[in-house]
Amino acid sequence: MPIPFSFASKPRFCRFLLCCITVLINYLKILSKLEYKYNITLLLIEDRVNFNINEIPKNIKIEFILSDVESEFFIYSFLNLKKENDNYYSAWFNGIKNRIDQRILRKINSTNFDIIIDFHRNISSFDHFMNHFDISKNIKKIYWIHSQYLLDCWMKDKSYYSFILSKYDKFISINNNMLNSCNKILKEFNIGNKPSYFLYNPLDIERIKEKSLITLSEDQKLLDNDFILQVSRLDAGKNHIEMIDIFHALKQKGIKEKLYIIGEGNTEQLEARIQELNLEEECLLLGKRDNPFPFMKKAKLFVHTSLFEGLAMVLIESMVCGTPVIAYDCPTGPKEVLENGKYGELIPLHDKEKFINATYQLLTNENKRQSYISLLPEAIQRFSFQSIGEKLEQILDNA
């Protein structure tokens, strides 16, 4: 059964790209073990995706829509659309988008695909294609929903998306809350008869465990300390300022642990807050780490104050490493990962006092911390290759 995965690295969403690529590669690993049943083609828009292509199983066919030079022009013209000579860059950008459409159409018409999966992270070039072209009804089309942002886009441009979405046969969301939102929107668009499912993002559990044992010599001194940890990109949505304030209150209550924050982004406001609270020696911004898992393994707790999430993969990764989690109950993600507080502490959004008290209890009551740790092997099985693979296989077989 030939199946193409459609995926692209739209420049406006580059900061989300790494997570989505990891999920994509994990799904390709799952499907590669079913090669007796599926022939997979990974169709990439740009010939410049920033990931190790060697991680993709060798039995997955990879094709690019644009050449390397075309990819550079595509991104450069996009990034310059709002400059003074906008018409010049718009002409380039729209010309390349039309070129993408024609090449996708040619590829579909020349290949006997049974299923097409649109796996883009957010707004995609494939949306543009589906708006202008029809695909044979004999080819089943699956739309994969990775973020609440995408659902919000549907509602902001109802006429555009109701037309595009009517052409799809199935929808897959990454958590149950998104599934419910998806079904509600499809019903509003008068296409509520479309089958929809949710599949958690799969994790390569054994690989994470292996990487958690690999430590760099320059990190050893940091790892020798007692610390709590947060890993995420540094932007306002991750709510690091509030986390630093919570940590300051915890230090005043007498905890000995430091706070390590791993992630890249603008550090100016965070550094100012740390300095204002005299936490320079206690709250450390460690920047980007290609392998954060040794820190997850060694941390006493993983703390998460994010305001928005898809599935909150870092919570699951921390749990794989054997470290319990405390998180704000933002609209999607933590509640499902922690199963309403069964597998970790779930705190009402912005309730700093409860967050402070719950964290203090876990740091000072080892029996309570160990009770959560004992449940982690059970918690992570929902995200294993085997569990997710079985569900995906059923969806594809019934397409």
Image: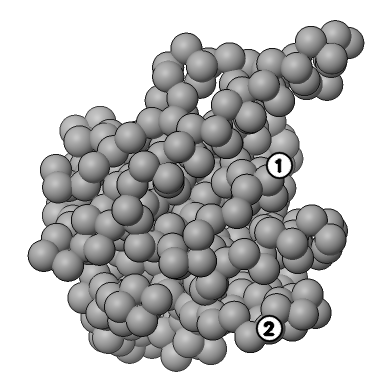
Choose between 29 and 158: the one closer to the eye. Answer: 158
Tell me, for residue 273, which label it has, or none: 1
Q: Residue at x 51, y 16 (%)?
A: 70
Please, what is the three-letter code of the amino acid marked with disc 1? Arg
Image point (39%, 76%), residue name? 399
How crowded is the residue under tag 2: few (<14 C-alpha within 10 Å), some, or many (20+)?
A: some
Residue 276 vertical position relative to residue 1 in the rendered view, above or below: above
Q: Which residue is mark 2?
A: 192
Answer left or right for 255 relative to 191: left
Q: What crowding class fits label 1: few (fewer than 14 Cα within 10 Å), some (14-19), or many (20 or more)?
A: some
Q: Residue at x 48, y 87 (%)?
A: 339
Q: Is residue 204 among the parts visible in the rendering?
A: no
Which quarter of the rendered picture does the N terminus lie within? bottom left
What is the total number of numbered labels drawn onto the structure image?
A: 2
| SS at mark 1 in the image | helix
| Above or below, comparing residue 284 to residue 384 in the picture | above
Q: Nearer the viewer, mark 1 or mark 2?
A: 2
Q: Residue at x 30, y 43 (%)?
A: 291
How far apart in space, not on screen, are marks 1 and 2 (Cα)?
A: 48 Å
Q: Along the polypeptide, which appears first: circle 1 or circle 2?
A: 2
